[in-house]
């Protein structure tokens, strides 16, 4: 039985990914931090379905907590076959108004966490000469977003991280890929009004917004042996919003 860690899995895209992997027979470690009640309820629901899941509360932007999570996963399941770096925050703000704290938080949560989780996981994957790292970026990491300069910068950083690490780990049969979602119906767009949502739909050739399940299906594919010859790639499920 293969094992996956999904960071930031208490809601939104991370939750959908965790559910999809659990349903498809993976041992699934569900990482959460602030959304404790919803995470525990989610984990309990999956366990009631007879699925192999465990939860672990950790701020993955903290190296010690990330290390503790990975050690727990190894102790509990014996291996880590897939790591999905999904944990992240978003913020809309004029660049001129960004504070040093805004900037540092964005880098710490969205980018440092990828480093802190990936490095120790790779040590385990190298022993087996196989593994999958899947990083969640954004279309804004590809094309940039007005009033989201810091967010776009870290998401672009995740893309660069993916491409460079894939070259380094390719000879060890470890695939590193990136998913760059388009506009997805999650809490991240909860502040948009109906008119703004319609405008986004109309700007998407498929005339709909994406769902968290759309991203989960992409992650499942990249984690499977069907994607063994795919590495260093940025796959962007965005309905044609960015082409």
Image: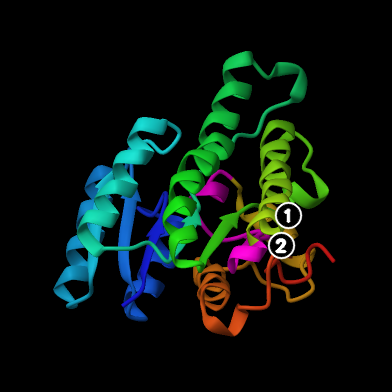
Residue nearest the observer in this picture, 123 or 77: 123
Vertical position of residue 93 compared to residue 177: above or below: above
Q: Position of residue 56 (x, y in %)?
A: 26, 48
Other-residue count near label 2 (Cα within 10 Å), few / some / many at <14 / 14–19 / ≥20: many
Q: Is residue 191 visible?
A: yes
Q: Position of residue 211 (x, y in %)?
A: 54, 68
Q: Name the disc covering residue 163, or none.
A: 1
Local SS, label 1: helix
Q: Position of residue 92 (x, y in %)?
A: 65, 34
Magenta residues, as a range?
A: 170-191
Q: Are marks 1 and 2 in contact (CB under 8 Å)?
A: yes
- Residue at (34% x, 50% y) in the render: 31
Vertical position of residue 136 compared to residue 129: above or below: above
Query: As drawn, is 190 to the left or to the right of 32?
Result: right
> What residue is shown with label 2?
232
- Residue at (50% x, 72% y) in the render: 213
> Does 27 lie within the magenta span?
no
Vertical position of residue 147 compared to residue 189: above or below: above
Q: Position of residue 37 (x, y in %)?
A: 22, 47
> Does 174 lie within the magenta span?
yes
- Residue at (79% x, 37% y) in the render: 146
């Amino acid at each position: 039985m293969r094992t996956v860690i999904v960071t930031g899995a208490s809601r939104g895209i991370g939750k959908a990914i965790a559910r999809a992997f659990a349903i498809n027979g993976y041992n699934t470690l569900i990482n959460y931090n602030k959304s404790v009640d919803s995470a525990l309820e989610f984990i309990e629901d999956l366990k009631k379905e007879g699925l192999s899941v465990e939860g672990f509360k950790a701020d993955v932007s903290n190296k010690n907590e990330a290390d503790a999570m990975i050690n727990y996963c190894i102790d509990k399941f014996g291996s880590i076959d897939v790591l999905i770096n999904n944990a992240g925050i978003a913020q809309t703000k004029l660049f001129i108004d960004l504070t040093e704290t805004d900037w540092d938080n964005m880098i710490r949560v969205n980018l440092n966490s990828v480093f802190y989780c990936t490095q120790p996981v790779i040590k385990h994957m190298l022993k087996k000469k196989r593994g999958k790292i899947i990083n969640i970026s954004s279309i804004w990491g590809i094309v940039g977003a007005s009033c989201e300069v810091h967010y776009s910068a870290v998401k672009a950083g995740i893309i660069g991280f993916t491409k460079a690490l894939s070259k380094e780990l390719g000879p060890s049969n470890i695939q590193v890929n990136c998913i760059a979602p388009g506009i997805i119906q999650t809490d991240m767009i909860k502040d948009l009004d109906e008119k703004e949502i319609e405008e986004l739909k109309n700007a998407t050739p498929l005339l709909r917004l994406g769902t968290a399940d759309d991203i989960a299906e992409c992650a499942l594919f990249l984690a499977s042996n069907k994607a063994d010859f795919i590495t260093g790639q940025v796959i962007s499920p965005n309905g044609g919003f960015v082409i």
